[in-house]
Image (cartoon, helix red, strand yellow):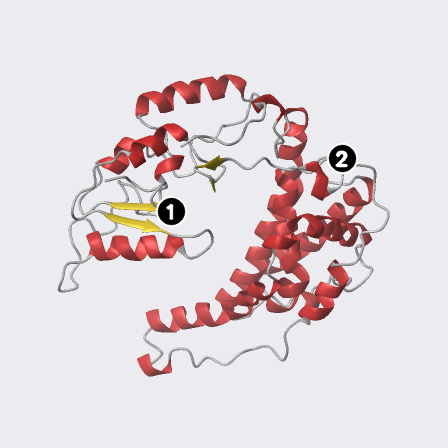
C-alpha cells in the first residue's frame, strides 16, 4: 500500500503552530485546564460528599465562573484562545463548553453558585463565549452529539451505588434503583437552536472551518489516525500470527478501551474458576491499562531513543515532549506480551490487518 497524502510536510496545517506554542501552553495552563479540572471537582466531589458543598467544592465552583469570565473577556478580543487561528487548545475548550449548558450546569447544580450569571448559549451573560462556541460548532458539528452528554446526569447514581456496594449497605437486587435527583433535564432543542445561529461579528481571524483543513492520510484508500507510523504498520502487517492470538478491530469511539480491559481480565487476571492469577493487575505489558495500537508505537527502544533525542532538541526549554500516545511501550513489547497475545487496533479489513 502507499501513502495517498502528497502534500509538503512543512506546509501541512497543524494544531500546534510553532509561532504560538508558548501562548497555547500559557492559555492551557492558566485558563483551560483549570476550568476543566474545576468542573470535574465541582461535580465528582459534590456527589462523593453526598451532595454537601465542602470547601473544595465551593472553591471549584468559584474557579469555574472566574475562568469563564476571563475566557469570555479574552474571546471578545481575539477569535481563538491563542490568537487569530485555531489551535489544539480551542478543540479542548470547545469540547468542554459544548457540555456546559447541556449538562454541567444542571447535572452539577452549578446554577446554585454565587458566581452564576446565566448559561452560555441560552443567555447573554457570556457574549464572547457564545459567539466563539457558534464559530467552533460550525467546524466541529459532525463530531458533536449533545444527547451523549446526558451521561453526566447518571454520575450521582454511579457514585452512590459504588459507595453502598463497598459498604455492603445495598442488596444485589436493589442495584440501579437509586432514584434520580433531577426534576427535569436541559432543553437540547433550545441549545441546538442557539448554537446553530450565525456567530455574528467576531474578532479578526480565520474562521474555524477554514483555518484547519487537514489532509487526510490514507493507506490502501483507508483513512488512518494521526498517530499512524508506516514502519510499525508494516511490521504489524507482516506479523506471523499464532493460533491463540486475538485481534480486536474496532471503530473509533466504540468502547475499545473497555473491551480491551475486559479481554485482558479474561485472558490474564482470572483463571477458569474465577480465581486471580499471578498476573492479576500486572500492568508491565501492553494493553493492560487500555489499548496499545500497533501502528502508533515506535518499532524498538533504539528508534524511540533516537527520535526522542531529535524531538527534545526541537522542544522549547522548560517543556517536556510526549514520547508516545500509549505509554512507554514499543512494538517489540507488543510482540513479546504474554500469550494469548492481544492486538487492539482501529485498522480493519484484509489490506490493513496481518496478512497471515
Tell me which corner region of the image, top left, top right, bottom left or bottom right, holds residue 32.
top right
Residue under the point 56% across and 24% down: 9
Tell me which corner region of the image, top left, top right, bottom left or bottom right, holds residue 87.
top right
From the viewer's perspective, is 159 left or right of 65? left
**In the rendered image, the vertical position of residue 102 relative to residue 19, given as above or below:** below
State how many labels appear: 2
Residue under the point 33% across and 52% down: 260
- Judging by the rendered image, the residue that carries numbered circle 1 is 348
Can you give x and y, in whole percent of width and height, for residue 98 in the image?
Answer: 65, 56
Residue under the point 61% across and 31% down: 16
Element on which disc 2 rests: loop
Circles 1 and 2 in contact, beta carbons < 8 Å: no
Q: CA distance from mark 1 to mark 2?
A: 38 Å
Element on which disc 1 rests: loop
Can you give x and y, in whole percent of width and height, for residue 230 in the image?
Answer: 40, 30
Tell me which corner region of the image, top left, top right, bottom left or bottom right, holds residue 295.
top left
Q: Is residue 121 visible?
A: no
For discs 1 and 2, the disc positioned in front in the rendered view: 1
**In the rendered image, the vertical position of residue 161 relative to residue 58, given as above or below:** below
Quadrant holding the N terminus? top left
> How crowded is the residue under tag 1: few (<14 C-alpha within 10 Å), some, or many (20+)?
some
> How crowded is the residue under tag 2: few (<14 C-alpha within 10 Å), some, or many (20+)?
some
- Judging by the rendered image, the residue that carries numbered circle 2 is 84
Which one is in front, 191 or 31? 191
Q: Is residue 258 visible?
A: yes
**In the rendered image, the vertical position of residue 14 relative to residue 342, given as above or below:** above
> Residue at the right extreme?
201
Can you give x and y, in whole percent of width and height, for residue 131 in the image?
Answer: 79, 51
Quadrant holding the C terminus? top left
Residue under the point 48% across and 65% down: 48
Amino acid at each position: 500500500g502507499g501513502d495517498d497524502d502528497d502534500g509538503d510536510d512543512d506546509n501541512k496545517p497543524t494544531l500546534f503552530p510553532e509561532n504560538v506554542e508558548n501562548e497555547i501552553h500559557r492559555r492551557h495552563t492558566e485558563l483551560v485546564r483549570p476550568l476543566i479540572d474545576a468542573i470535574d471537582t465541582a461535580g465528582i466531589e459534590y456527589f462523593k460528599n453526598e451532595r454537601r458543598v465542602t470547601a473544595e467544592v465551593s472553591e471549584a465552583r468559584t474557579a469555574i465562573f472566574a475562568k469563564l469570565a476571563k475566557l469570555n473577556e479574552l474571546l471578545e478580543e481575539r477569535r481563538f484562545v491563542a490568537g487569530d487561528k485555531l489551535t489544539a487548545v480551542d478543540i479542548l475548550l470547545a469540547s468542554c463548553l459544548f457540555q456546559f449548558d447541556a449538562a454541567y450546569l444542571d447535572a452539577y447544580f452549578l446554577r446554585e453558585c454565587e458566581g452564576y450569571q446565566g448559561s452560555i448559549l441560552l443567555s447573554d451573560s457570556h457574549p464572547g463565549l457564545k459567539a466563539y462556541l457558534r464559530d467552533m460548532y460550525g467546524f466541529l458539528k459532525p463530531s458533536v452529539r449533545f444527547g451523549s452528554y446526558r451521561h453526566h446526569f447518571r454520575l450521582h447514581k454511579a457514585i452512590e451505588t459504588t459507595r453502598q456496594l463497598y459498604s455492603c449497605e445495598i442488596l444485589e437486587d436493589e442495584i440501579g434503583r437509586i432514584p434520580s435527583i433531577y426534576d427535569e433535564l436541559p432543553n437540547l432543542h433550545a441549545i441546538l437552536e442557539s448554537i446553530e445561529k450565525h456567530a455574528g461579528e467576531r474578532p479578526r481571524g480565520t474562521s474555524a472551518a477554514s483555518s484547519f483543513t487537514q489532509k487526510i492520510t490514507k493507506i490502501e484508500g483507508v483513512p488512518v489516525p494521526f498517530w499512524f507510523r508506516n514502519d510499525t504498520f508494516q511490521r504489524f502487517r507482516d506479523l506471523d500470527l499464532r493460533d491463540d492470538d486475538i485481534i480486536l478491530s474496532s471503530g473509533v469511539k466504540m468502547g475499545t478501551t473497555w473491551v480491551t480491559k475486559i479481554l485482558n481480565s479474561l485472558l490474564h487476571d482470572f483463571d477458569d474458576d474465577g480465581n486471580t492469577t499471578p498476573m492479576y493487575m500486572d500492568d508491565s505489558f501492553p494493553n493492560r491499562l487500555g489499548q496499545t495500537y500497533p501502528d502508533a508505537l515506535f518499532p524498538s527502544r533504539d528508534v524511540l531513543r533516537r527520535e526522542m533525542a531529535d524531538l527534545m532538541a526541537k522542544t522549547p526549554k522548560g517543556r517536556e515532549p510526549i514520547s508516545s500516545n500509549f505509554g512507554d511501550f514499543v512494538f517489540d513489547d507488543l510482540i513479546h506480551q504474554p500469550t494469548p497475545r492481544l492486538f487492539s487496533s482501529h485498522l480493519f479489513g484484509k489490506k490493513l490487518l496481518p496478512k497471515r
